[in-house]
């Protein structure tokens, strides 16, 4: 077992291609047949298991690559509040994209169905919050971000976050997840543990589910109030929504920066200055021969699939 080595950028890119195509062709079919079971198949069978098997087959240490290190209760609490304030920013970013796309297309984005009762909500917590939190974090903050550190910590963080957004294959849900990936990646670096990013991912999805569930409970009353009230022009509605979401985003950004700055680091964690300045140089034993000829063709293929899929959805 190569205890001290990490996957190369080439390996990460090929893995991203294979799992991305599996998600696009097989996962989409499974989810179209039955959403929840399809999501479980996608996350565990198409993302998590192949990722783990690949690392084991190549002889990498799961503990080293995935940073399977303990975290403290204080770090868990900080992670929760960081996600609380990151969520409004992600929503605002997705809203901006939706408005921009809406100027050239009338297509309406589709999302995961909101639970209609408490039983569906509990099932949703497992399928939509916990499952992606584990499976996707192992892939993106685990294998991919770890591999891209050979390009530098900052570059690895940014690249893995962007690829995380693209992996959703939905232009309406691109920028928000990319931003979330950035926050989760920072949590990973500051704690030196994938468990903080997993918890952060779970918290984020659980917040979205919970808000959606409780908002649906009052939808009927809101509709009655809107129907009985004066008609508000679309332009004014847009400006009001933009101001409200933007205001929450600005306030949340300030709180988010403060919480990240105060995040309790472990002794082994990467300090904040290293996020910007440190360039990790892997040993020649890891990157030799063909591994030095880094190719981004696999990423370009997934990007092409992303562009084609969204173009077809928006304009065809």
Image (cartoon, helix red, strand yellow):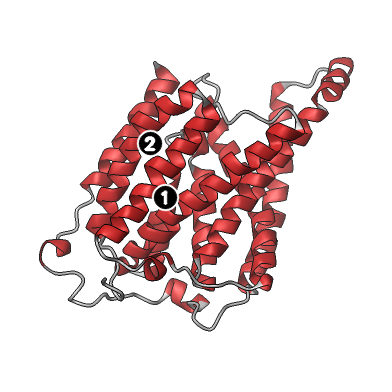
Q: Quadrant of residue 223?
A: top right
Q: Residue at x 58, y 78 (%)?
A: 265
Question: Are there few (<14), some (14-19), or many (20+) residues within 10 Å of tag 1?
Answer: some
Residue 12 in picture, x, y percent from top left: 29, 55
Q: Quadrant of the C terminus?
A: top left
Please tell me whether mark 2 or mark 1 is closer to you in this view.
Answer: 2
Vertical relation: 47 (above or below) 69:
above
Q: Cα distance, mark 2 to mark 1?
A: 17 Å
Residue 145 in picture, x, y percent from top left: 39, 61
| Image disc number at residue 55 | none
Residue 151 in picture, x, y percent from top left: 30, 66
Q: Residue at x 38, y 71 (%)?
A: 64
Q: Quadrant of residue 122?
A: top right
Q: Is residue 243 visible?
A: no
Q: Quadrant of the N terminus?
A: bottom left
Q: Is residue 85 visible?
A: yes
Residue assigned mark 1: 162
Residue 224 in picture, x, y percent from top left: 86, 18
Q: How many marks?
A: 2
Could you tell whether 182 is left or right of 251 in the image? left
Sequence-first disc among 2 and 1: 2
Could you tell whether 300 is left or right of 95 in the image? left
Q: Secondary structure at mark 1?
A: helix
Q: Secondary structure at mark 2?
A: helix
Question: Are there few (<14), some (14-19), or many (20+) residues within 10 Å of tag 2?
Answer: many
Q: Residue at x 36, y 57 (%)?
A: 144
Q: Nearer the viewer, residue 235 or 13?
A: 13
Q: Nearer the viewer, residue 277 or 185?
A: 185
Q: Residue at x 65, y 58 (%)?
A: 253
Residue assigned mark 2: 23
């Amino acid at each position: 077992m190569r205890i001290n080595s990490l996957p190369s950028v080439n390996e990460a890119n090929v893995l991203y291609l294979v799992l991305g195509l599996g998600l696009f062709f097989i996962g989409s079919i499974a989810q179209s047949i039955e959403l929840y079971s399809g999501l479980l198949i996608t996350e565990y069978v198409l993302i998590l298991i192949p990722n783990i098997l690949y690392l084991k087959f190549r002889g990498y240490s799961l503990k080293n690559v995935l940073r399977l290190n303990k975290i403290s209760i204080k770090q868990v609490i900080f992670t929760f509040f960081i996600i609380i304030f990151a969520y409004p920013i992600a929503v605002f970013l997705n809203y901006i994209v939706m408005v921009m796309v809406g100027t050239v297309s009338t297509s309406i984005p589709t999302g995961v169905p909101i639970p209609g009762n408490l039983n569906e909500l509990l099932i949703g917590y497992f399928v939509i919050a916990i499952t992606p939190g584990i499976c996707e974090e192992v892939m993106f903050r685990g294998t991919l971000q770890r591999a891209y550190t050979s390009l530098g910590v900052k570059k690895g963080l940014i690249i893995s976050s962007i690829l995380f957004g693209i992996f959703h294959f939905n232009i309406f849900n691109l920028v928000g997840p990319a931003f979330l990936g950035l926050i989760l990646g920072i949590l990973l670096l500051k704690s030196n543990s994938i468990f903080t990013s997993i918890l952060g991912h779970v918290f984020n999805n659980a917040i979205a589910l919970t808000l959606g569930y409780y908002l649906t409970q009052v939808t009927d009353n809101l509709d009655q109030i809107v129907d009985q009230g004066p008609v508000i022009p679309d332009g004014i509605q847009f400006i009001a929504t933009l101001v409200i979401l933007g205001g929450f985003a600005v306030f949340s950004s300030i709180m988010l920066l403060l919480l990240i700055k105060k995040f309790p680091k472990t002794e082994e964690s990467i300090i904040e200055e290293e996020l910007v300045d440190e360039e990790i140089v892997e040993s020649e034993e890891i990157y030799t021969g063909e591994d030095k000829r880094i190719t981004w063709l696999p990423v370009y293929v997934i990007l092409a699939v992303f562009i084609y899929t969204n173009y077809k959805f928006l304009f065809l």
